[in-house]
Image (cartoon, coloured by chain):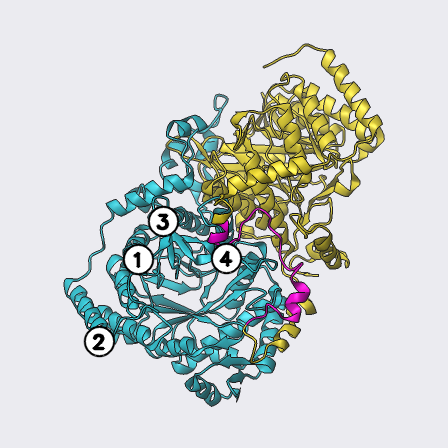
Chain colours: A cyan, B yellow
Amino acid sequence: MTRDPLPSSVDMPKSRRSDRRRLGRERSGQHSPARTPGSNIVRNIPAYGILSDDRLSEIEEHADWILCEVGIRFQDDPDALRIFTDAGATVDGDRVRFDRGHVKELCATAPEVFTMHARNPMRNVTMGANHVVLAPCDCAPFVTDLDNGRRYGTLADHHNLTRLLQSAPGLHHNPAIICEPSDVPVNKRHLDMLYSQFRYSDKPVMGLVNSEQRAEDSLSMARIVFGEEFLDTHAVLLAGTAVQSPLTFNVETTDTIRRYAAAGQANMITPFIVMGAMSPTTIAGTLAQAHAEAMTGIALTQLVRSGSPVVYSVFATTMDLRSGAATYGTPESSLANMAIAQMARRVKLPVRCGGQLTSSKVADAQALQESTSTLESAALAGANYILQAAGWLEGGLTIGYEKFVIDAERCSALGRILQGIEFDDNEMAREAFIDIDENTSNLLGSRHTMANYATANFNAELANSESFEQWTENGALDTETRARDTWKRLLSEHEDPELDAGTEEELRAFIEARKSSYDDSWY
Amino acid sequence: MTRDPLPSSVDMPKSRRSDRRRLGRERSGQHSPARTPGSNIVRNIPAYGILSDDRLSEIEEHADWILCEVGIRFQDDPDALRIFTDAGATVDGDRVRFDRGHVKELCATAPEVFTMHARNPMRNVTMGANHVVLAPCDCAPFVTDLDNGRRYGTLADHHNLTRLLQSAPGLHHNPAIICEPSDVPVNKRHLDMLYSQFRYSDKPVMGLVNSEQRAEDSLSMARIVFGEEFLDTHAVLLAGTAVQSPLTFNVETTDTIRRYAAAGQANMITPFIVMGAMSPTTIAGTLAQAHAEAMTGIALTQLVRSGSPVVYSVFATTMDLRSGAATYGTPESSLANMAIAQMARRVKLPVRCGGQLTSSKVADAQALQESTSTLESAALAGANYILQAAGWLEGGLTIGYEKFVIDAERCSALGRILQGIEFDDNEMAREAFIDIDENTSNLLGSRHTMANYATANFNAELANSESFEQWTENGALDTETRARDTWKRLLSEHEDPELDAGTEEELRAFIEARKSSYDDSWY
C-alpha cells in the first residue's frame, strides 16, 4: 500500500479499484468512498517538492550551524542534560551544542513508518511514507455553535465533539484536548479527557502531556485498555508536546517526552512557531530553526529509547507584524508547511504539518479560504499527520461545531484528491466515445455514464449544488447554517462504539481512585 | 533570488528582490507586494506533476485514438472542412479524422510563450512558461451584492466590476463579459462591453465572440486603440470560445477562431466539460477527449495563420450525477485541472485551467472552500491563465461584488505563494540567532525582526485577525459583510485610468455608427 510517490505512484494494486467501488456502494450517503474503513488515507499521487535538494541542504546546514554555534537550551532538566552529555554533546549551563551532523545521526534510529494502534484494530492508522492521518482541533479552551454562541468548553462538549470525530470518515485520530473541559478541575481533567477519547471513539488517541501526573495517568489508562505487554511494544498513545521556541525546551516538555519514549509510545514534539516572534520573520531562517528544534527533540526520544516512534512536527504560521496578531492560511505559512514536509521526508520520518487553520471567528468565507489553503498545500506536500484539521477557529482558541462538520467534509474530499487519477479500460471510456454519433449531444444517457454514475464522484453532503431557485425555496441557508443541522443530526443519530464492560469499569475505577487521591485545583 | 526548480522558470532579473522591497513600501496597504506593477505573477516554484510521463503518454495516445477512430465534427462550416482536407485530414460528412500524431504536428507552430498587449504597456502580460495571469468571472448573466440582492446585470454593473478588476493588483486581465449588460440589446452589447474594458481598465482585454459581427467589431475597435499595423503583429485581443463537447465544433465557434487567428490575435478554445454530460464520468477519459478537442481547435488556428498565438484551455468540472447539477471545487475537478496543466506543458503551450469556482449562491464557507481548492491546485500544477478567478458564484450564473473582492485578495496571496521561498543572508537570519541569549523569550524586538517586519509578509486587508473581543466590539462582521465595505470603498476611491481623448472619441463614434446601422434585437 505504501508505495510511493513519483512515477510509480499511479500504479495501484489491482484490487484497489474494485474495493473502492464496493465501498462506494456499501457506504452510500457517507462522506468518502475512498477509504478503507477505519484506516487512514493513502496518498497515491506524488508529494510536491517546493525546494530543490540544494536548498534543502542549505537549510539542513544552517540548522547544523545553529545547533553547533548557538545551541538549544534545556531548562530545569538535569536528566536531559546528562543524556545529551553522555551522547557526546557539549553542555554549557542549560545550553546544549552539537557537532555538525550529530543530531541527524542520533535521529537515525527513529522508524520511518509506524502504526498507531486503536482499541479497534480496524481503526489503526499508519504514520509515515504515503499515509495521511487527519485529526481535529486540539487544545481549544472555547467552543462555539450557532445556537449557543462562544463559551468555555465543558466535558459534555468534549464528549460530543469526540462523537463527531468518531462519525467522520475523513478524520482518523483523536486529538488530546478536542476542547478544554472547563467544568472539571484543571489537575483532574486529563483523566476525563482520555476517558472520553476511549469511550466515545475507537480511533487512536493522544496522551495528555506537560506533567508527570498526566503522562503517567495516560500510560496507566492505556495499560488498562491495551494490556501492559502490548503497550510496551506498540504505540497506542501519541504525546504531542511543544518546544518553547526559539531554541528552548522546558522541563515539562522534556519530562513528558522522556516518559512516553521510555514506555515505547509515540512522541510528536512541535516547535510552535509564529514567525517573527518564536523564530525570524523569514521563512528560510524559520525552517532551519524548526529543523534544529524538531530534530533535537527526536534525538532525545532516541537516546531514551532507541527506535521509539516519533513524528517530525512543526507548526509554523505568520503574524501581522503591525498588530502582533497571529495569522493563518497565509501564503508564507503555506510555503513553510510545504518545505517542512520536504525536510522531514529527507530525514525519512513521518511528518506533521498543516491543518485547517484560520483567524476567523466564524465559519465564513475567510475561515474556509485560509483553512482549505493550509490543508491542501500541506497534504500535497506530503504531510503524514494533519492535526487541527477540523473545527479550528480564532487561531485555535475556539472549536466550532459548524466549522467541524464543514472541515470534516473537506477532509474526506482530500482523501479523494490524494487517491489520484485511475487508469484502466473503464476509466479510459472507449465505449463512451464509440457511442457518440450524429445524434449525441451529450453523454448523460450513455451506457458508460449509466454504468458509472453512482460511484464516479465524491459525494459531498454539505456542499449545496441546488439552483438559486431551489436553494431560495429551501430557505436560502448559507453553509454555516446548514452545518448546524448536520452536526445535530450526526449527534442524534450517533451510536457510541462498543467498549468492553470490564475495561470500562476498570477505567472508571482508576479515574475515581486517582481523583479522590488529591485535591482539586482550578489553576 | 529564489532560484529554483525549473531552470528557465526561475531566472528573474537581479533587481527583483529589491524591487519587491521597494514596492512593498510604496504600495503599503495594497494587496500584494510581490508583483511588478501592471504585469502578471511569475511562478518561481516548480509546477506540480500529478501524473507520470507514462500516464501522460497514455492520455495522448487515447486522444489520438479518438481523433483517428471517432473523429471530431465541424458543423455548418465548409471552410473549416476544406482547411482540414487540405491539411491531409479525412473528412466524412462533417466529421474530421486525423492520422495519429497529425494534430500534434499541426499545433507545433503555435508559440510556447506570447505577450498579450494592453493599451498601457506597463500592463502587458506574458502567457506561457512560468507566467500566471489571473482574470475574473466571465459571462455571468446575474450580479449580486448584499445591498441589492441577485438581479440581472446591467451596463453600470459591467463598468463597476471592470473598475474593481482594474483596482485589484492580483488580477491582470479582463474577461470578455464580466457580467451580461441586460439593459443593452443583445446584438449591440458587445460594443459596450469592449468599450467598458478599454475605458475603465488599462489591462489586456478579451474580444467578443460567436458571431461575425462581434468578432469584426472587436477587431475594428482594437484597431482604433492600437493601430492597424500594431494589431497585425501583436496580440491585443484574446478570443475565448467554447467547444461543443463532446467532439463537436459549431460554426459560431470556428468562424470566430478563424477571424481572430487571421488577424493575428490570440485564441483560447475551451472544451467546456461537465464530466458525465459533455464527456465520460471518468477523469482519464475526459482528459483524452479534452486533449483531442483542444488540440484540434489549436490546429485550426495554425492552419489559418501559422504561429498565431493560442492558449491550450480546458474547463472541466463534475456533476452530481443523481441531481444532474454541475458541481465545482470537487476533488475530481482538482485532479482533472492538475492533469490538464501537465498535458499542455507537454506540448509546450500556454495553459488555461482552474478558477475560483463554486456552486454556492453566496460568498460563504462552501464558496471559498471550493474556490480556494480550484485556484490553488491549478496554480500549483502550472496554470498560466486562470479565468473565473474572482466573483464567480452559482456555477458562473452570478458574479458577486463581495465574492469578487474576497477572491481578489486570495489572487494576490497566490502571487506570494508562487513567488516561493527566498534564500539569502537576510532570509537565513544568522544575526537573529546570534542575538538569542539567556534573556530572549522571543524575537519580536530583535534587530532582525525590526529590520524585516514591514515587508516580511503578504498584507491581507480583508482577512480579519483581530481578537474575538476586538472583532465583537467592531460589530462581529463576517467576511462577506466586511467585503461589502471593501468594494464600496474601492469604487468610491477609484480613479479611471486615462484614455487618450482622441481614441475615446473615435471609439464612441464607431460604436454610435455601428449601433445605428442595424436594429436592436433582444434575443
Identify the mark nearer the N-term, 3 or 1: 1
Q: Amino acid at mark 1?
A: Thr
Q: The residue marked by circle 1 belongs to what chain?
A: A
Q: Main secondary structure of the magenta part?
A: loop
> Is A471 placed left or right of B393 in the picture?
left
Q: Quadrant of the C terminus of chain B?
A: top right
Q: Amino acid at mark 4?
A: Ala
Label 3: few (<14), some (14–19) or many (≥20) C-alpha neighbours in 10 Å: many
Identify the mark nearer the N-term, 2 or 4: 4
Does residue B256 show up? Answer: yes
Q: Position of residue B65 (x, y in %)?
A: 54, 37
Task: Please state which of the two labelled residues, at mark 2 or mark 3, is closer to the viewer.
Answer: 2
Please give the range of residues in magenta. B442-471
Q: The residue marked by circle 2 belongs to what chain?
A: A
Task: Please state which of the two labelled residues, at mark 3 or mark 4, is closer to the viewer.
Answer: 3
> Is B499 placed left or right of A486 in the picture?
right
For numbered disc 2, what is the local secondary structure? loop
The residue at 35%/59% (across/down) is: A179
Q: Nearer the viewer, residue A257 or A446?
A: A257
Q: Position of residue A259 (x, y in %)?
A: 35, 78
Q: Are marks 2 and 1 in contact (CB under 8 Å)?
A: no
Q: Which mark is residue A517?
A: 2
Task: Please state which of the two labelled residues, at mark 2 or mark 4, is closer to the viewer.
Answer: 2
Q: Nearer the viewer, residue B378 or A329?
A: A329
The Cα–Cα distance between marks 1 and 4, rounded to whole angstroms, is: 31 Å
Pointer 4 residue: A378
Q: Amino acid at mark 2?
A: Ser
Q: Which mark is residue A401?
A: 3
Residue B459: in magenta span: yes
Pointer 1 residue: A154
